[in-house]
Amino acid sequence: MGLFKSLKGDLPDKVGVSGSSIPPAHTVAGASNNTADEVYEPPAGPPPSWRNHSQEYEPPAGPPPSWKQETEEYDPPPGPPPSQRSAAAPAAPYHDWTSIPDTALLPPPPSLGNDASPSSNANTSDAERAHVWCEKHPLLKPRQPTNAQIVSARNGDSKLVTPQGYKGRLAMQSKGRWRGSTRAGSTDSCLQTEQPLYFSTIDSPMFTEQKKTIYYEVRILSLGPTRGEDAPSLALGYCAAPYPTWRMPGWERGSLAIHSDDGRRYVNDTYGGKDFTEPIRTGEIVGIGLSFSVPESPPEYGASPEVGSSLTGEVFFTRNGKVDGGWNLREELDADDEFGVLGVDGQFDLYGAVGIFGEVEFEICFDKHDWRWQPA
């Protein structure tokens, strides 16, 4: 017994069920070998099934797709809705296309220039020679006339100068009356008065504030036969000095005229002129006048000096004592007119100019007492 007790006293304090001892090397399944006061560190993060209700997360940018803010405003699309019509929009004007306007009160259409004359035309070499001559001889500036020149022009006592190359006769019948003739085959030539009929320095309405008119008449006694396409012709008009005497008036710068063969008017026009009147026949007395006056309306502010000093120029044509047409110098100018009304616009002295081509017999009258047409 003593031995048993001693062995019993040496047994470990821990015992198993029913007092049986459990070897130290063996443990119960699921039991821990640690003591009650041992502490372990928890794993990082919460358990997978745990959620912290107090944790806040950032919402995604922008509102949810189905959410719309009631106070948000959007710009409307441009323009009115398709179904809406503005009350202020004017209605399209109605035009009755069945009604035909009365064109009787409208002005006539502008005269168009022609490339050539239907009756007779000068050769190209004469025209080119004249162009070169005019470039070398610019128009002369107006000069103060003498008392004798003024009296001669006022009384119609004008003298004519025969140009070089003139083939014919020319003689003064009485004061201001001349008679001449040219032979068949005569080339173009231009008779000019010795002194101006219009003196710009004393006759211009810009100085006198009065209308100024110059005029003379021509009577065609006979016209020779037409040779091929060249019909004899006489041209009556005016020119500024100097002027090429082998050219008809109206063809070169600083001149205007009406031609008998085609009835056209020429103003610084080296081509075919513009349609104007019927051709002039043998036995008719025709006249050409030019009136200058102050424009009814003043030039616009800032206008160039040339425009500001311009006069109104009216050309009129008479046939057998009655006015048979006319035109305003500054109207119906073609855009391609190279010289416009240069030289014949009242800013230069103007001479009487009568052109002759072919076989022509004529009389020229500068004396107003013998004119068929009389001013009112």
Image (tube, rainbow, N blue to C red):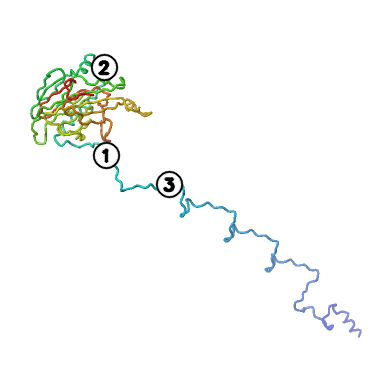
The 10 Å Cα crowd at callout 3, few under 14, some 14 to 19, many 20 or more, is few
Give the answer, above or below, for where 90 lies relative to 18: above
Q: Quadrant of residue 271?
A: top left
Q: Amino acid at mark 1?
A: Ala
- In the image, taking residue 260 as reference, residue 203 lies left or right, namely right
- Viewer-nearest of discs 1 and 2: 1
In the image, is residue 238 above or below residue 230? above
**Residue marked by disc 2:** 144
Extreme-top residue of the structure: 147
Kind of residue indicated by mark 2: Gln
Dot 3 or dot 1, earlier in sequence: 3
Q: Quadrant of the C terminus?
A: top left
Please tell me whether residue 25 is drawn above or below residue 155 in the rendered image.
below
**Mark 1 crowd level (few <14, some 14–19, many ≥20, 10 Å Cα):** few
Among numbered discs 3 and 2, the one appearing first in the sequence: 3
Specify whether 234 is left or right of 202: left
Alpha carbon separation for disc pair 3 and 1? 33 Å
Q: Quadrant of the N terminus?
A: bottom right
Quick one: SS at disc 2?
Answer: loop
Q: Read off the residue under disc 3.
A: 90
Residue bearing mark 1: 104
Q: Position of residue 75 (x, y in %)?
A: 53, 51
Q: Between residues 213 and 300, which one lies in front from this camera angle?
A: 213
Circle 3: residue type? Pro
Q: Earlier in the sequence, mark 1 or mark 2?
A: 1
Q: Position of residue 145 (x, y in %)?
A: 24, 16
Label 3's element?
loop
User: Label 2: how many residues lie within 10 Å, few (<14), some (14-19) or many (20+)?
Assistant: few
